[in-house]
Amino acid sequence: MVVFDSCTMILLARIDILEIFISNYDGKVLIPDRVRAEVLIQGREEKHLVAKLIEDSKIHVLRVKNSKLVNKLMNDFSIDAGEAEAVTLVLQEKATLVATDDRNAIRACKILKIDFTTAIVFLLRAFEKNLIEKDETIAKLQKLISIARYEQAIIEDARRRIEGGI
């Protein structure tokens, strides 16, 4: 099971990897209520894709039961409600990992010893599994760089891995 926060779900939708990941993932994809609300805001380009994936039961929306933990995570790590609910849902459902690109949520995961992954890792895995071609991967990486903030070392590592065939 993987739990997504809004940021990573939106990034993957915008680079056309979300549906590829979900259709090639054997586990459950979960999001908390808050993430659904954040992603399905009127006017978001990814709204219809995510709504369809939820409607088709490819993304499961769950309610977080421990609101005190959500508030504590928000206060302790300076994260928004969506990220706090995603981290709480990982613990609640004993999920494998959380998909987040939020720096403070990543810090919370490290401290709480929760496995996490990022949009750039999803892109690299899709390439590694031959779900997308090299040229398409490079184009998607460029788009990801234009809409997200990554340290230069992470970007360069991703480029090297793509150019080297991982």
Image: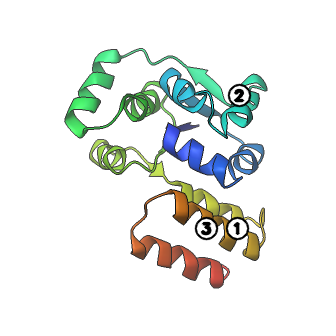
Q: Secondary structure at mark 3?
A: helix
Where in the figure is residue 151, as x and y percent of width and height? 39, 68
The amino acid on which the numbered mark 2 sits, given as a three-letter code, is Ala
Tell me: residue 40, above or below residue 96: above
Where in the figure is residue 79, as x and y percent of width and height? 31, 37
Q: Earlier in the sequence, mark 1 or mark 3?
A: 1
Where in the figure is residue 113, as x and y percent of width and height? 33, 45
Residue 102 in sight: yes
Q: Earlier in the sequence, mark 2 or mark 1?
A: 2
Q: Residue at x 43, y 31 (%)?
A: 82
Q: What residue does disc 3 label? A: 141
- Mark 1 vs mark 3: in front: 3
Q: Give the Cα distance between marks 1 and 3.
A: 11 Å
Q: Earlier in the sequence, mark 2 or mark 3?
A: 2
Along the line of sight, which residue is nearer the eye, 53 or 14?
14
Q: Is residue 84 left or right of residue 75?
A: right
Q: Furthest-front residue in view? A: 43
Q: Residue at x 79, y 26 (%)?
A: 56
Q: Is residue 126 left or right of residue 156?
A: right
Label at residue 127 = 1
Label at residue 87 = none
Q: Is residue 7 left or right of residue 142?
A: left
Label at residue 51 = 2
Q: Residue at x 74, y 45 (%)?
A: 19
Q: Secondary structure at mark 1?
A: helix
Q: Secondary structure at mark 2?
A: helix
Q: Give the Cα distance between marks 2 and 3.
A: 25 Å
Q: Furthest-left residue in view? A: 76
- Label 3 near label 1: C-beta < 8 Å? no
Q: Label 3: few (<14), some or many (≥20) within 10 Å?
A: many
Tell me: residue 115, above or below residue 131: above
